[in-house]
Image: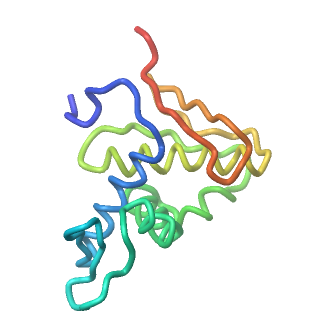
Amino acid sequence: MNKFLRKNRYELQALREQVAREYAATRKIEGREGGWIYHETHRFPICQGWASFYRRNKTAILDWATTNFACFKGFEDMLLAKGSYRPTISPYGPQSKQMLLVAMEYNRHQMLRQDSRRAYIPGWQITVTGYYADTACILTANAS
């Protein structure tokens, strides 16, 4: 079993920060002392903290994560898919964090858009609480 999935509960903010780090690594961006985020060729920091980095680059990160495992041009294309399409996500393998983040953000965005479609993750349930832009999402394993 994937080491990442040994836990039975994940919160959206933690996944955002983990995937932001993965995305940053592909762009030669790294964290340094004091929580500052730098591009390797720049002297001045981009921002402080991975949560801040995620907020600043949310669209790019979600597009990158979506295109890594789905045949959509980006996250927005998946949200606006025609018909009754909803993604089925099997979060196993090297991209499990990215897949779970996309599923949780998909459900959160669809809820905010008042669309009834939700991502399906076999054996897992996404709970969305609140009706604001930073709505909380919690991913839990279904009891067997």
Left or right: where 37 falls relative to 11: left
Q: Is residue 56 visible?
A: yes
Give the total number of marks visible in the rendering.
0
Q: Position of residue 90 (x, y in %)?
A: 39, 37
Judging depth in this view, the residue of 8 and 36 nearest the camera is 36
Residue 39, by quadrant, is bottom left
Q: Residue at image x 36%, y 39%?
A: 91
Judging depth in this view, the residue of 138 and 47 nearest the camera is 47
Name the residue furthest top.
144
Q: Is residue 73 visible?
A: no
Q: Residue at image x 59%, y 49%?
A: 106
Q: Position of residue 62 (x, y in %)?
A: 48, 62
Q: Position of residue 45 (x, y in %)?
A: 32, 82
Judging depth in this view, the residue of 123 and 61 nearest the camera is 61
Name the residue furthest right.
114
Q: Residue at image x 54%, y 34%?
A: 120
Q: Position of residue 124 (x, y in %)?
A: 46, 26
Tell me the quarter of the image containing the C terminus. Answer: top left
Residue 50, by quadrant, is bottom left
Please say which color scheme the image uses: rainbow
Left or right: where 121 falls relative to 119: left
Q: Is residue 104 above or below residue 18?
A: above
Left or right: where 36 falls relative to 127: left
Tell me the quarter of the image containing the N terminus. Answer: top left
Q: Is residue 10 above or below residue 131?
A: above
Q: Residue at image x 34%, y 46%?
A: 97
